[in-house]
């Protein structure tokens, strides 16, 4: 085999990948290394999986049913293992609701798709002076940068990208992969893999020459990005993207569509240490201005039900559920009133978001809407409160303040307060 | 120059240290006996040089040497026509003994059709963003701008057309600027913020909600500007798709509405306030019948040195040199003093006298000494480091990122892809758009605010390493760049030199030749080795930067 001289610090990853060099490490050393890392690794596994229902889900038909009201619609509520009822079309999820919770009094004021998406992801309303980071970027910034053993990006978006890292910088932007784990341009054939070493050798000569010629810091930043890209290409952690390797039974339990496989991929990514994964709930449109009940019953909910219940069971079985916070929502809810097309329109005033896992006090519904689903009775919550709750679960201190490029201080989660009932 | 005093201290400290260890220091860059010139004769260029030199003296820095012909030619091509020069162009320029060759190249490039395309790209991105918002016509926007740059229309007229635009988004492409800012039903808040920032170089958007924390701008100013833009709305037309029978987007347009009277806004205290259309203390009649955007377009060009002139000077200086006289270039005002205020003022005044001739402005900048220096800095000017937050002194060129468009077009030049096989324009254009789309997705950054901070991403690096375009670029199939190169006469060294010239636009140094020869010598298959060398050249930092 050709002797590959990989690019600077990537030697270790490269050798591991190409030659299976683990055998070269003395056993004793290997074991003690493993042991020393055990507690560390466990601590570092904290992660958040955001299930994003683009278009705005009719939460009144999923999580907060109103039987007896003219707004109630076709579906009936069923009892769950938690202390709440949910839609009859979520029977599997009902069986794991003791591990999940509902926030039934989200009140988020933005009922436009783009503005709502921005607000729910960042906890800030759009503002022409600054681009706020989406929360995945915040987690990447706070947790990802500390996970030195992570070769792959710390904010991965499965099936689409929403929002940007804003003032936190490009290295925390969502890294987009498809639900089958394909990363564009990352997979090269064996012949090219073999040549990578000599290519990088030559690149090293060119890059170092330019860096030494003293032209500023950009030259180095370029080298760093390439280092990361090569790490990614050659890392053993790339295995995490091979969702195909999962047993057939498990794949079927999650659902074999894009959403189910995306969730399964998310679990694999959590296992290698990725702290934030956004999964697109691409189970049909959620923007249900017409025919809401038929669509939900026949298309959206069966897949959503399978995916969520399988994820919870899988995480629990692997003893990961207390470290992984699950959030499931869209940019807003939908009108309690049913329109003439048997649809529901945009509604941000009173709707439900689902959270769970993450060591929260689960199995409960927090907040309450009135019998028609229009008004909120008691306390209402903002996206900042939701993200503050997630931050609490992830161990991110709430008093953190980020500074925009213009020196404007930005409180974590827009200064939201963790939801008392959930953090216990 | 009080604002430099902090740096002055640094300089003193540095001079003392440097003095102590002077014996081991490399020889200072050759001091230039006579004043630098590109061969142009223009008192404005002399004025620029004098002002910039004053800054060097005041701060006791020594400028970097003049850039080599190779370095400078690459830069001026990227800046004016948006792509690197070909190997032949570099060779010809280096051999040219004409002492006015630089100024001649500047003139030639400004008359090249690629100048029009490049500045159309730059301004399309600024006016409507990299990703076209829904119901905005990118083609319409580009058509308007192409015409403006091809005719070298006076900038003040272009701006006036943009802010007063009305009509169909393809018949009058200028409306796309407004349509792109009218995405949210937001009472022209976005239009106000963008117009003042892009064309006047001031940022009033903070004052939408409160008085500016760092300057004297009050909240009412935002709403006074805003009240100029309230007499319009967008109409989105729909049509039936004959194939599916479904309603789909047709055209959009901007139409005038009969809004009159003041606008109302809420103070933080909850108190409602009124604001009338007022620009720089001139109040416009708020009654019906007055076309406020027309009035606005007249007011912004009044005076000897209107904001619109300073704004474009500052932006163009920043475009060519990497940093403007203020940072960012579109945030001027008493709270953010310019690094070279006299120069900025004078250039703005002269631009007005030259009827806002943008080519003339580009000529002044590109013929200036500062633009002609190397991007390498030395011990005598390393404090001139705006990337570390220092005030720019323009004592060396600053390294800039290539835009996605520049990178794509340069890859095409470097690999001769436009010559080989790709004669079909439409197919080439489709490929270009596909690549740009993918690169943008990998980029995920719309405003591209800082052109000098490298903000490449892993997906972009992967795309450069393994993407289709790179694969084609290093392909050795018949008619390809490498295929032709290998068929040419000459030894390995000649071929290596040619490859450097096609990509980095310079000749390789000894170390590079040795490394490349080693790579080729060690390989059983020469072709493979050449491909790997070319791969490395295209992926290098030096290739993707404009320096």
Image (cartoon, coloured by chain):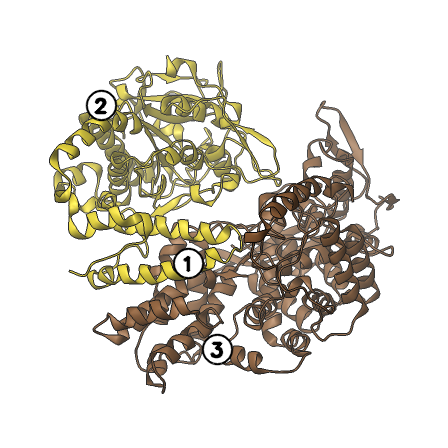
Q: Position of residue A57 (x, y in %)?
A: 40, 35
At a point 82% along the width and 54% down the height, the residue shown is B306
User: Which quadrant of the structure image shows residue A316?
Assistant: top left
Which chain letter goes with mark 2?
A
User: Chain B's colour?
Assistant: brown
- Which mark, by number, is residue A207? 1
Q: Is residue A374 left or right of residue B314?
A: left
Q: Are marks 2 and 3 on the same chain?
A: no
Q: Is residue A95 above or below residue A27?
A: above
Q: Which residue is mark 3?
A: B87
Mark 3 surroundings: few (<14), some (14-19) or many (≥20) residues within 10 A: many
Q: Is residue B535 visible?
A: yes
Q: Is residue B87 above or below residue A331?
A: below
Element under label 3? helix
Q: Position of residue B399 (x, y in %)?
A: 55, 57
Locate the N terminus of chain A by quadrant.
bottom left
User: Which quadrant of the structure image shows residue B127?
Assistant: bottom right
Front residue of B349/A165: it is B349
User: Chain A's colour?
Assistant: yellow
Q: Earlier in the sequence, mark 1 or mark 2?
A: 2
Q: Position of residue B434 (x, y in %)?
A: 42, 63
Q: Which residue is mark 2?
A: A95
Q: Position of residue B100 (x, y in %)?
A: 69, 78
Which chain letter goes with mark 3?
B
């Amino acid at each position: 085999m050709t002797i590959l001289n990989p690019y600077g610090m990537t030697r270790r990853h490269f050798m591991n990948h190409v030659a299976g060099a683990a055998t070269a490490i003395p056993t004793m050393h290997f074991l003690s290394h493993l042991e020393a890392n055990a507690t560390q690794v466990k601590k570092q596994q904290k992660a958040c999986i955001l299930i994003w229902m683009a278009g705005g889900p009719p939460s009144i038909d999923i999580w907060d049913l109103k039987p007896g009201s003219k707004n109630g619609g076709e579906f009936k509520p069923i009892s769950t293992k938690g202390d709440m009822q949910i839609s009859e079309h979520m029977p599997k999820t009902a069986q794991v609701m003791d591990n999940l919770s509902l926030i039934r009094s989200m009140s988020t004021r933005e009922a436009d798709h783009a503005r709502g998406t921005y607000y729910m992801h960042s906890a800030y309303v759009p503002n022409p002076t600054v681009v706020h980071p989406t929360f995945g970027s915040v987690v990447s910034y706070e947790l990802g940068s500390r996970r030195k053993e992570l070769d792959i990006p710390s904010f991965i978006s499965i099936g689409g990208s929403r929002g940007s890292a804003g003032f936190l910088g490009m290295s925390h932007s969502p890294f987009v992969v498809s639900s089958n784990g394909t990363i564009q341009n990352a997979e090269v054939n064996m012949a090219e893999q073999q040549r990578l070493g000599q290519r990088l050798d030559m690149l090293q000569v060119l890059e170092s020459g330019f860096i030494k010629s003293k032209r500023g810091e950009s030259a180095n930043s370029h080298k760093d990005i390439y280092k990361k890209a090569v790490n990614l290409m050659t890392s053993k952690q790339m295995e995490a993207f091979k969702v195909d390797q999962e047993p057939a039974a498990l794949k079927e339990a999650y659902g074999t569509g894009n959403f189910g496989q995306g969730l399964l991929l998310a679990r694999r990514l959590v296992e290698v240490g990725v702290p934030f994964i956004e999964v697109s709930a691409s189970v049909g449109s959620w923007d249900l201005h017409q025919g809401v009940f038929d669509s939900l019953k026949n298309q959206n909910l069966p897949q959503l039900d399978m995916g969520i219940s399988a994820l919870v069971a899988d995480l629990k079985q692997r003893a990961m559920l207390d470290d992984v916070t699950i959030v499931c929502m869209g940019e807003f809810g939908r009108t309690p009133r049913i329109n003439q097309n048997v649809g529901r329109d945009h509604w941000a005033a009173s709707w439900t978001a689902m959270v769970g896992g993450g060591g929260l006090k689960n199995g409960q519904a927090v907040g309450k809407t009135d019998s028609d689903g229009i008004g909120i009775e008691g306390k209402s919550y903002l996206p900042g409160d939701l993200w503050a709750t997630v931050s609490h679960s992830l161990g991110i201190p709430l008093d953190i303040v980020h500074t925009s490029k213009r020196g404007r201080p930005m409180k974590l989660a827009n200064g939201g307060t963790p939801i008392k009932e959930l953090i216990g | 120059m009080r604002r430099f005093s902090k740096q002055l201290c640094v300089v003193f400290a540095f001079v003392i240290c440097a003095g102590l260890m002077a014996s081991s220091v490399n020889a200072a860059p050759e001091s230039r006996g006579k004043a630098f010139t590109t061969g142009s004769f223009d008192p404005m260029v002399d004025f620029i040089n004098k002002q910039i030199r004053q800054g060097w003296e005041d701060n006791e820095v020594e400028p970097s040497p003049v850039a080599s012909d190779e370095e400078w030619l690459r830069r001026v091509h990227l800046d004016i026509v948006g792509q690197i020069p070909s190997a032949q162009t570099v060779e010809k320029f280096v051999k040219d003994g004409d002492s006015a060759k630089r100024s001649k190249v500047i003139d030639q490039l400004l008359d090249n059709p690629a100048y029009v395309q490049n500045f159309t790209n730059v301004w399309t991105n600024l006016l409507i963003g990299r990703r076209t918002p829904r119901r905005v016509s990118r083609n319409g926007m580009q058509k308007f701008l192409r015409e403006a740059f091809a005719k070298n229309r006076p900038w003040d007229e272009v701006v006036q057309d943009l802010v007063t635009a009305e009509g169909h988004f393809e018949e009058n492409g200028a409306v796309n600027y407004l349509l792109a800012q009218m995405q949210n039903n937001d009472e022209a808040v976005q239009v106000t913020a963008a117009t003042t920032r892009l064309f006047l170089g001031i940022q009033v958007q903070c004052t939408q909600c409160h008085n500016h924390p760092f300057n004297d701008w009050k909240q009412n100013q935002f709403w006074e500007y805003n009240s100029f833009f309230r007499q319009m709305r967008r109409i989105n037309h729909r049509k039936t798709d004959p194939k599916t029978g479904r309603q789909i987007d047709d055209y959009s347009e901007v139409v005038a509405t009969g809004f009159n009277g003041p606008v109302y806004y809420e103070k933080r205290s909850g108190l409602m306030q009124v604001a009338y259309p007022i620009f720089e203390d001139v109040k416009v009649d708020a009654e019906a019948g007055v076309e406020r955007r027309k009035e606005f377009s007249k007011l912004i060009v009044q005076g000897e040195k209107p904001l619109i002139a300073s704004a474009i000077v500052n932006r163009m200086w920043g475009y060519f040199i990497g940093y403007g006289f203020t940072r960012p270039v579109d945030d001027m005002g008493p709270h953010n003093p310019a690094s070279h205020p006299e120069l900025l003022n004078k250039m703005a005044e002269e631009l007005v006298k030259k009827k806002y001739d943008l080519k003339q402005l580009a000529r002044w900048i590109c013929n200036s000494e500062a633009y002609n220096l190397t991007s390498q800095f030395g011990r005598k000017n390393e404090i001139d480091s705006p990337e570390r937050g220092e005030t720019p002194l323009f004592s060396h060129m600053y390294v800039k990122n290539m835009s996605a468009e520049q990178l794509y077009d340069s890859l095409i030049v470097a690999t001769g892809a436009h010559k080989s096989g790709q004669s079909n324009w439409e197919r080439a254009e489709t490929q270009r758009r596909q690549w740009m789309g993918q690169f943008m997705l990998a980029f995920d950054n719309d405003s591209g605010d800082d052109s000098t901070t490298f903000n490449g991403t892993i997906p972009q690096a992967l795309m450069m390493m393994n993407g289709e375009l790179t694969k084609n670029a290093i392909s050795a199939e018949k008619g390809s760049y490498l295929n032709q190169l290998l068929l040419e006469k000459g030894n390995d060294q000649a071929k290596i030199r040619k490859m450097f010239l096609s990509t980095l636009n310079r000749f390789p140094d000894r170390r590079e030749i040795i490394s490349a020869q080693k790579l080729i010598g060690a390989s059983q298959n020469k072709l493979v080795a050449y491909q790997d060398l070319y791969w490395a050249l295209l992926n290098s930092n030096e290739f993707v930067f404009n320096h």
